[in-house]
Image (cartoon, grey):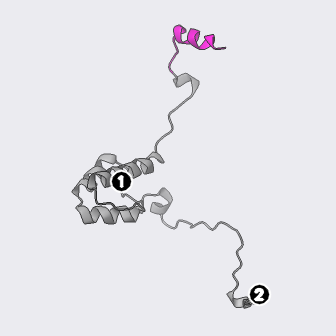
Amino acid sequence: MAAKRKKKKLAEINQTHAKVEKLKPTTLDQIWGTDDSSRYKTLNFEEYKSQVEAMDKSMLKEHAIDLGLVPIDNLAILKDRLFAEFKGYIGQYAQIPDQTVENQEKVSEEVLKILREGA
């Protein structure tokens, strides 16, 4: 015998509009992105490294949990993971190098000759 379905009441049903709702910034700091709400409070690797080195074991584990990492007992590996996460985070803000033709190095004739051999 099949189980009966339980009908939901109209008040229990939610409807979405599939519209992406974005938080509108209300202060200049939020517009500029300098409201210290970043995960690390800095974009300087040396500054972050000194912060991590100053933490004890319990603070390191708590910091790892805040970042979404699994805290492990081996502090050397945990610090390496924290540094790798930080480098990935600051990599989002790295400037893209200028790749215009004017700013590229001139290639020597020998290199051009080698490249033409495969064609």
Direction from residue 8 to residue 44 in the image, left or right: left
In the picture provided, is 113 more to the left or to the right than 13? left
Determine whether the residue tagged by mark 1 lies in a helix, strand or loop.
helix
Tell me which residue sits at (57%, 28%) in the image: 100
Residue 7: give x, y in percent of width and height: 74, 90
- The amino acid type found where label 1 is placed reads Leu
Which residue corresponds to the image point at 31% horizontal and 53% vertical from the top-left?
79
- Specify the amino acid type for callout 2: Ala
Quote the CA–CA distance across marks 1 and 2.
53 Å
The mark found on residue 108 in the picture is none
Is residue 36 something that shows in the picture?
no
Residue range (magenta): 105-119
Q: Say left or right for 88 vs 115.
A: left
Residue 59 occupies quadrant: bottom left
- What residue sits right under mark 2 in the picture? 2
Q: Name the quadrant of the C terminus.
A: top right
| Residue 82 - label | 1
Quadrant placement of the N terminus: bottom right
Is residue 95 shown above or below 115?
below
Give the mark toward the camera: 1 or 2: 2
Question: Within 10 Å of the Cα at label 2, are there few (<14), some (14-19), or many (20+) other Cα atoms?
Answer: few
Q: Secondary structure at mark 2?
A: loop
**Magenta portion: prevailing SS class:** helix
Q: Residue at x 44, y 51 (%)?
A: 89
